[in-house]
Image (tube, rainbow, N blue to C red):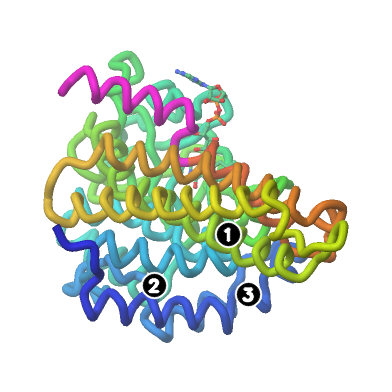
């Protein structure tokens, strides 16, 4: 067993960390206030080759694996979870095409993404989030393709995406077997995107409603066979959950940086905060959770890169990192005392940003359902 990253992975991690310190950290507070997609950071990360690293080389991507994606993601999210999410969610949206796309779909859409085009993954609906199989968006067969009608909610980057991967029902009575995925250009007639939704945190990553009113999608924009959409989505989550776990790892590390610096500086009752055991133990516990979350995340990504099943490991990593991140952010606020509640200090933002990690990409409860289900299979 080798716990070391190789030379290339170390280089990628250092490049991403330097980029995050230089380009993301200084912009985080303003991006949070302005609630706008971080165009400039995206452009610079693209120029440096830090985006699309897991897209195939044949379409202009980096040709690297999930572990390298995790390293970059972790570094970005240590800088700002909102900006990190805005930049990294393309990997979720493009994965269905990596897995199931035809050569023509890959050449057109993955090549565009490798050049910096943004994409969205459109599954969730007002009436169906955890209940993926319960989506109601309908894809009816018409001459030459399909007509999509329905609505989606909470779709990350939908207002800036060039194309969306939309999941819809081709056979509404067939449960999860009736679901199919489609590539839908945002400029398609009948597709409209609402204003970014107001939310607690991760404000630099816009999330919008998407309305589909008889949107024609040509047959060659279907991903895989009719009815393969549910299975495809589950395969995508095996790829994307390690990345979302890395969101949490980055955030925990930032909580430690901020809380350790404050606890070393601030004095109470004649001692530095860190000299009070109650505070020191919180920091120690944060470090323990960081190490555990990171190892679980790297393991889930590494298994995938080895072509081995990682469903249970990806869910464990995602649930553990998300819960640990929320806990670490809460304790970071506690260590800062009143200043932790102030918008003048960065920890209130860490606290707001952390919460959604337990909600999106499968809630913490859904991850536990998956873990328990997989345990029964073993
Ligand atoms: C900021 C943000 C960004 C997002 N980005 C995207 C995106 O890009 N694309 C996309 O498709 N979606 C996206 N989502 C949607 C997200 O994936 C869903 O919100 C999430 O899956 C939960 O679904 P829900 O909101 O409908 O909650 P519900 O499914 O209604 O769940 C409500 C509560 O009930 C619990 N619950 C539900 N069913 C069960 C069960 N069977 N067992 C135990 N507990 C259960 C849940 O864990 C949760 O606590 C995003 C959401 C947010 C907030």
The residue furthest top is 173
Mark 1 or mark 3, which has the lower sequence index?
3
Which mark, by number, is residue 205? none
* Mark 1 lies on residue: 81
When the figure is inspected, residue 58 is found, relative to residue 303, above or below; the finding is below
Mark 2 or mark 1, which has the lower sequence index?
2
When the figure is inspected, residue 24 is found, relative to residue 221, above or below; the finding is below
Decide which of 107, 27 is in the foreground and name it.
Answer: 27
Contact? badges 2 and 1 (CB < 8 Å): no
| Image-quadrant location for residue 60 | bottom left
Q: Residues within 10 Å of mark 3 (few under 14, many from 20)?
A: some
Tell me the SS state at disc 2.
loop
Contact? badges 2 and 3 (CB < 8 Å): no
**Residue 370 lies in magenta, yes or no?**
yes
**Residue 80 lies in magenta, yes or no?**
no
Decide which of 226, 217 is in the foreground and name it.
Answer: 226
- Which-is-in-front pick, marks 2 and 3? 3
When the figure is inspected, residue 220 is found, relative to residue 132, above or below; the finding is below
When the figure is inspected, residue 282 is found, relative to residue 176, above or below; the finding is below
- Residue extent of the magenta highlight: 361-378
Position of the C terminus, as image quadrant, is top left
Mark 2 or mark 3, which has the lower sequence index?
3
Tell me the SS state at disc 1.
helix
The location of residue 129, given as percent across then percent down, is 50, 29
Decide which of 308, 169 is in the foreground and name it.
Answer: 308
Q: Residues within 10 Å of mark 1 (few under 14, many from 20)?
A: many
* Mark 3 lies on residue: 25
* Mark 2 lies on residue: 51
- Which-is-in-front pick, marks 2 and 1? 1
Measured in 3D between alpha carbons, the distance from the residue under mark 1 to the one under mark 3, in whole angstroms, is 10 Å
All told, the count of numbered labels is 3
């Amino acid at each position: 067993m080798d716990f070391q990253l190789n030379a290339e992975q170390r280089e990628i991690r250092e490049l991403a960390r330097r980029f995050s310190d230089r380009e993301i950290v200084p912009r985080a507070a303003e991006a949070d206030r302005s609630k706008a997609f971080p165009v400039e950071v995206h452009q610079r990360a693209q120029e440096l080759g830090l985006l699309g690293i897991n897209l195939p080389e044949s379409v202009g991507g980096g040709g690297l694996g999930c572990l390298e994606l995790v390293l970059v993601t972790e570094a970005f999210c240590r800088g700002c979870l909102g900006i990190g999410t805005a930049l990294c969610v393309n990997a979720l949206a493009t994965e269905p095409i990596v897995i199931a796309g035809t050569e023509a779909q890959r050449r057109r859409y993955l090549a565009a993404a490798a050049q910096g085009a943004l994409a969205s993954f459109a599954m969730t609906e007002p009436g169906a989030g955890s209940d993926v199989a319960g989506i109601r968006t309908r894809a009816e067969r018409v001459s030459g393709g399909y007509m999509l009608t329905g609505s989606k909610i909470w779709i990350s980057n939908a207002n800036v995406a060039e194309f969306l991967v939309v999941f819809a029902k081709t056979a509404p009575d067939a449960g999860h077997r009736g679901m199919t995925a489609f590539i839908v250009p945002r400029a398609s007639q009948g597709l409209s995107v609402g204003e970014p939704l107001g939310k607690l945190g991760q404000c630099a990553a816009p999330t919008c409603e998407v309305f589909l009113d008889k949107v024609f999608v040509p047959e060659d924009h279907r991903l895989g066979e009719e009815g393969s959409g549910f299975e495809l989505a589950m395969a995508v989550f095996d790829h994307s959950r390690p990345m979302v776990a890395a969101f949490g790892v980055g955030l925990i590390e930032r909580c430690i940086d901020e809380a350790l610096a404050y606890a070393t500086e601030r004095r109470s009752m004649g001692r530095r905060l860190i000299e009070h055991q109650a505070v020191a133990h919180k920091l120690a516990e944060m470090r323990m959770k960081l190490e555990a979350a990171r190892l679980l995340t790297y393991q889930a990504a590494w298994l995938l890169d080895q072509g081995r099943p990682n469903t249970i490991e990806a869910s464990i990593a995602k649930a553990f990192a998300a819960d640990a991140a929320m806990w670490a952010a809460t304790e970071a606020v506690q260590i800062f005392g009143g200043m932790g509640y102030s918008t003048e200090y960065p920890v209130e933002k860490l606290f707001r940003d952390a919460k959604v990690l337990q909600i999106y990409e499968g809630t913490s409860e859904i991850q536990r359902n998956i873990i328990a289900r997989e345990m029964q299979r073993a």
